Image (cartoon, grey):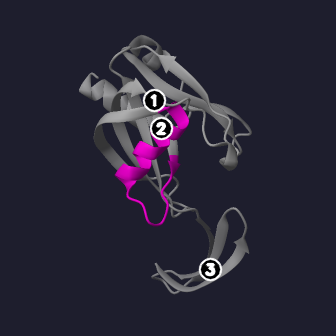
Amino acid sequence: MQITDRKRVFTGHYKIDELAVRASNGQEFTREQFIFGNAVAALVFDTARQLYVLTRQFRYGPEREVLEIAAGMIDHDDTPDATVRREIHEELGYEVDTLTHIATVYSTPGASTETIAIYYAEVSRQTGPGGGMAGENEHIEIVTLDWAALLAEPFQDAKTLVAVQWAQLKKR
């Protein structure tokens, strides 16, 4: 496959490009590409309370509240490690003690440019209220789960499933 042309067809909160594509057999067609940026996410474990700390917030894709690990977008001048630490503080109110990179994955490789760097973070000090940034229209509920409840939860969010399955393999 070869991309022969690219046009920006939508610019709003998100961006969409239309790609002209040529297949190896010479066939030409178009595809849309969702330009989103890159993100971070973390399964957070409070070592003092022995609880996992997650978020519940409204998500526009499924049009409902979703229980998921803390996550956010990487600013252009920031690193994934710095971003995940900032997001954990903004959403959950915790300072990070230790941070382990699990994987960096494409969220939807068939249509989106987004990657998500997924982490496991241990915390022990809640120094802020969490709940997200009002200026970013975030309304986040902090949810704590013990190990059994974490494993019993029927998560539908892919990044959360990756992190929880990693924790199961590592027996965290």
Residue depicted at x 68% and y 42%: 134
Residue 98's image quarter? top left
Q: Are marks 2 and 1 in contact (CB under 8 Å)?
A: yes
Q: Which label sits on residue 53? A: none
Structural crowding at the residue carrying mark 3, measured as other residues with C-alpha within 10 Å and reported as few (<14), some (14–19) or many (≥20): few
Q: Label 1: state its secondary structure.
A: loop
Instruction: Compute the Cα span from label 1 to label 3.
Output: 53 Å
Query: Given the image, on which type of amino acid does mark 3 rest?
Result: Phe
Quick check: can you spot residue 17?
A: yes
Pointer 1 or 3: first along the chain: 3
Give the answer, above or below, for where 120 lies relative to 136.
Answer: above
Q: Which residue is mark 2?
A: 89
Of residues 153 and 131, which is closer to you in this image?
131
Q: Which residues are magenta?
A: 72-93
**Which quadrant: the C terminus?**
top left
Instruction: Compute the Cα span from label 2 to label 1.
Output: 8 Å
Residue 78 lies within the magenta run? yes
Query: Given the image, on which type of amino acid does mark 1 rest?
Result: Thr
Give the answer, above or below, for where 74 lies relative to 45.
Answer: below
* Count of marks, rendered view: 3
Q: Which label sits on residue 29? A: 3
